[in-house]
Amino acid sequence: MCINFFCNKCQELPINNPLFGLCDDQNGTKAYTNIDNPAKWIATVKNDYHVNLVFTAIDKCVIKDNEEVGRGRCDGMLTSEGKNHIYFVELKMRLKIG
């Protein structure tokens, strides 16, 4: 199976905020970025140089649950403008103590 990891329907618009979060609501929906609710952030992206970054949801979008059964996949990827850099992302919830 050929997989297009740059599928437009799975990509968000470019974001160049200096700080934003990556979220996964763990409810069967795909992961996404968020700029205004840090309480939802599982991962924080520090973007000091305001580089245009595109988030692509891989799990539940590029690769659906019924495709590639039994094969692991990450939640998403961030690509820099021009695709010079690719960052694959696996989001994991941490237990809060106290």
Image (tube, rainbow, N blue to C red):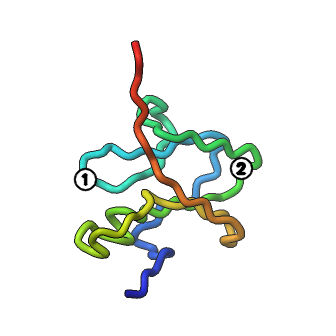
Q: Residue at horizontal 71%, vertical 50%?
A: 50
Mark pair 2, 1: CA separation: 31 Å
Q: Residue at horizontal 52%, vertical 55%?
A: 89
Instruction: Identify which residue, 21 or 68, lies in the foreground.
Output: 68
Q: Amino acid at mark 2?
A: His
For marks 2 and 1, the one nearer the N-term is: 1
- Helix, strand or loop status at disc 1: loop
Q: Residue at horizontal 29%, vertical 54%?
A: 29
Q: Which residue is mark 1?
A: 28
> In this image, 31 relative to 48: left or right?
left
Quadrant of image for the N terminus: bottom left
**For mark 2, does the 10 Å Cα neighbourhood hold few (<14), some (14 to 19), or many (20 or more) residues?**
few
Instruction: Identify which residue, 53 or 64, lies in the foreground.
Output: 64
- The circle on residue 48 is none
> In this image, 61 relative to 14: left or right?
left
Q: Can residue 13 be spotted in the picture?
A: no
Quadrant of image for the C terminus: top left
State the image coordinates of residue 81 (x, y, percent, origin top left).
67, 66
Q: Residue 65 appears in which quarter of the rendering?
A: bottom left
- The circle on residue 50 is 2
**For mark 1, does the 10 Å Cα neighbourhood hold few (<14), some (14 to 19), or many (20 or more) residues?**
few
Q: Residue at horizontal 25%, vertical 47%?
A: 27
| Residue projecting furthest to the bottom | 1
